[in-house]
Amino acid sequence: MMSPDPSPVLEKRGRAEGAAVAGDRAHAIVIGSGFGGLAAAVRLSVRGYRVTVLEKQHAPGGRGIVRKREGFTFDSGPTVITAPFLFEELWEMAGEKLSDHVDMRPVTPFYRIRFSDGSLFDYTGDPVAMRKEVARFNPADVEGYDRFVEESRRIFAVGFEKLAHVPFTSAWDMAKIIPEMVKLKSYQTVYGMVASYIKDERLRQVMSFHPLLVGGNPFSTTSIYTLIAFLERKWGVHFPVGGTGALVDGLVALIGRLGGTVRYGAEVARITHRNGAATGVRLASGEVLESDVVVSNADSAWTYRHLVEPSVRKRWTDRKLEKTRYSMGLFVWYFGTKKKYPEVAHHTILLGPRYRELLDDIFEKKVVADDFSLYLHRPTATDPALAPEGCDTFYVLSPVPHLESGTDWKAFGETYRKRIEKALEESLLPGLSANMVVSEFITPQNFQDDLSSFRGAAFGIEPVLTQSAWFRPHNKSEELENLYLVGAGTHPGAGMPGVLSSARVLDTIVPDPSVFLQKR
């Protein structure tokens, strides 16, 4: 297992110019420094809150923490940046420009998809190039592909532009959108919708894999998530120079300039409460911090199961949480090579010989199969400085069942890693074993133990229709007043646009600081 890169900095503080003293400002505590938590901290700071971010690890980023080994820099988790305007908006709110702090570069192809027979499909945002790629596999599917993209655009216009920032705090919020959702056939699965337009099985896989990027099974995830196809076409896929960690560092610095505080090694043991309202947190160290507002960027199931006392939970009881469906787990192997592989794209998806059957093993049977599909990240294709000269940085991600599989990852992890190494050496990375410099991995057990992910599910609650929008844990907690949730496990869901949008929802549901000051 790889431990995060050590840092001597345990706390970062800053104060916005002209900010009032702490006692004159309402206080907001943010639990966790993932992208949802950092975005929430920026938004609350801009609105006038004094913000304290509490992170149990020794560095920021949550699942996006940065690891550094022997000159190699590894982004631990999120690597696909879409809808960059959601980041730009955070800096603009503070009167700054993202481009002055982070250099975002477009990536093309978005993904290079490799089938088990060695054939390749370059997935891009260029409509002409995409039609040509589709035609290479099945000319008869070009018209159906165009109709699928148009359907994706219609779903995007509703699912993202209209609903991603709606709080869904009441059943009425859900009832109002049902007619539109029925019209868009959101009762269909992603694969089912794709299959209604495209006949070639390989192309169906190409157009339906996106839910796996947010923890969903294409054969059970609501077709609302086909909006990702148009979202990527509209804004492209990007990567920041310095890695995704450059965005984390940029947000932490921005929070400091706005007067916020980020504390590391500060594990929250319990959200304190009085008279049905959150009042702050108690740390594992025993320290108690009071606040007017608590925002949890921790996994939503973990928040309710471990941070909120059972006596105050009416909806998200232990029984309810046990019965909820969760996303798959991830096996992620980080490695660096002493040679370069210039023919390997920035993002490569290696599809195994089985598609539906493998996903059924992962999501339904919850068994670790002998075969696998992989996502290979080579960030040095865009930023060579993430590895020593003449070297390459990689991580490879394999979807696996979450911890309900009963897999002993401590005993099995190295065996599984060797399987992946062999597969990569025989396909894209010849000579891999002889050229490897650093090699470490994390498993679903690490997601639970280190990242507080319930059952080691990497993306929280699974995005099936009956666990979407109002049916997910609400951004405004149903259990305690003044408690709010952001991140993958709440609305609208996982993925970078989803977690950033969850913080955006707070603008409409968190009271202005003056409301709390008037009560003092």
Image (cartoon, rainbow, N blue to C red):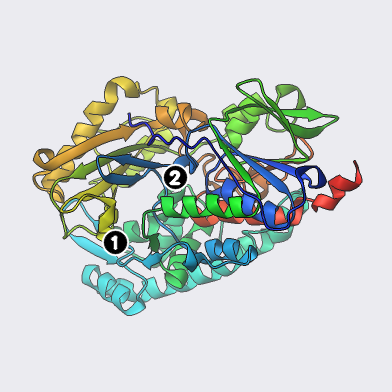
Q: Seen from this angle, which residue lies furthest bottom?
A: 128
Residue 73 left/right relative to 261? left
| Residue beneath the point at 41% across and 27% down | 445
- How far across and how far down the image is residue 314, in percent? 75, 30
Q: Amino acid at mark 2?
A: Gly
- If the image is split into quadrants, where does the N terminus sit? top left
Query: Which residue is labeled 1 in the image?
Result: 382
- How far across and how far down the image is residue 378, in percent? 26, 53
Rounded to the nearest angstrom, the CA distance separating label 1 from label 2 is 18 Å
- If the image is split into quadrants, where does the C terminus sit? top right
* Circle 2 residues within 10 Å: few <14, some 14–19, many ≥20: many
Disc number placed over residue 476 in the picture, else none: none
Sequence-first disc among 1 and 2: 2
Q: Is residue 248 above or below residue 370?
A: below
Dot 1 falls on a residue whose secondary structure is loop
Residue situated in front as seen by the camera: 465 or 511: 511
Residue situated in front as seen by the camera: 470 or 223: 470
Q: Is residue 258 above or below residue 271?
A: below
- How far across and how far down the image is residue 226, in percent? 47, 61
Disc number placed over residue 64 in the picture, else none: 2
Residue situated in front as seen by the camera: 450 or 430: 450
Q: Quadrant of residue 197?
A: bottom left
| Residue beneath the point at 40% across and 63% down | 238
Q: Amino acid at mark 1?
A: Thr
| Residue beneath the point at 51% across and 65% down | 98
